[in-house]
Image (spheres, helix red, strand yellow):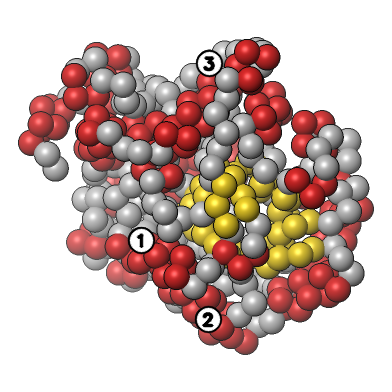
Amino acid sequence: MNKNHHDTNGLSRRDFIKVSATGATALALTGMGALNATAAESTPQLPRRRYGRTGLQISALVGASDWNPEVIPLAVKAGVNYWHKAQKWTAETMPDAIKSQPRESYYLEVVVDRVGGDNKRGHIDEEQHYQFVKQAVAKSDVGYYDVFKFHFGYHSIEEAKTNLGVINAFERLKKEGLVKHLCISQHHYKDINGDMAFDIVAYLMDHSPFEAAQFFHTYGDEKQIADVIALAKQKDFGTIAMKTMRGLGRAGADDKFQALLAEPRYKGSTPGTAMVKWIMSNPNLTAAVIATKNFDQLQENLAAAHAATLSMNDRHSLDLLAAFNKGQTCLLCSACVTRCPEEIAIADILRYERYALDYHELSRARAEYKTLTKNGTACIACGDCMPACKEDINIIAKLKQVHNLLG
């Protein structure tokens, strides 16, 4: 880390929490702000990029069905034309700003989950996936979904080779004109003796009809993620980054935020806007889906995505956030999971911590935590996982903390 940032190490954990009260996941911000004509007219248009073999030209920031409905008109005005998890909208709840447009001008994604359990204990079922999408099309009255996405993805390369249920469901739906393109949202599965997301995605590029993938990606990630994004670009395979804004919600709650950012090296930047620029500055990445809770966040994200170019002050802001995250906020890389003799889903547990502390979705985090076969109490404090952590997190202590928060 740059020595100019060492002076931040003397601050307490609480001192750092508001490192970024603005930007993509500054969930502590309050006040939606009225969507007015002046703001909408001045909104910069998002760049669009080819979504791999789908051929779709999608906005560099994609929208999601869980966004606050009040921000969606501005998003549409700014050129957001791809909507993640659109199956959650019915004909009655789909925002007018979207459905009032010509159907061919925007792209809707339907995601299918495993059945009979969660993403680890559930199974792939061709008929149930097929029926789920047929029913979603009927309820939404959209005619078809542009993208059929397998949510959470395969457990292993072997499963991708041998279990064709998702692909078969897609092919049946495509023949009926209900879906057009096949994509995947891929997680790591080392805790159940599976494979890492980047290995599975790399396999799918050459050995399957999948056309694009979505996966975890944030500042400070391991090299394998950047490598698979570059490989995807070479092979015309689309990529969407998710879980990008590591630690920003926690950073957004600290009272010393303004004092820190008043220093000259942060002038004109925040970690949130810098993170969006960093994501957008990668020419190999198609797009990113970023949690957006209010009008102010969306405006800042749009402006940052339009600018894209990182300034030196933006880089300083990212370094400041990296200093805040060191030792406390997980990269979700799952390297620790490969060392755990108890096969605890450490990365999942710390992902749920993100929901609680960065997204301020405590109920969701507790519900997800409750589904775990082994939670933080399964840790035997052997310490085998600790050397694998790039972020120097005291995982033994962290699992206890998260259990106290979510258990």
Instruction: Please name which of the two marks, 2 or 3, marks the residue nearer to the observer.
Output: 2
Tag 2 and tag 1, C-beta contact below 8 Å: no
Picture quadrant where residue 136 is located: bottom right
Q: In percent of the image, x 19 and y 24: which residue is there?
A: 265
Q: Residue at x 31, y 37 (%)?
A: 310
Residue 226's disc is 1
Say whether disc 2 or disc 1 marks the residue closer to the N-terminus.
Answer: 2
Foreground: disc 1 or disc 3: 1
Q: Is residue 263 above or below residue 367?
A: above
Which residue is under mark 2? 206
Q: Secondary structure at mark 3?
A: loop
Q: Give the residue at the far bottom of this rendering.
A: 162
Residue to which mark 3 is pinned: 30
If you read the primary sequence from the N terminus, does the residue marked by circle 1 or circle 3 appear first?
3
Mark 2–mark 1 distance (CA, rounded to whole Å): 18 Å
Q: Are marks 2 and 3 in contact (CB under 8 Å)?
A: no
Rendering coords of residue 106 (x, y %): 73, 46
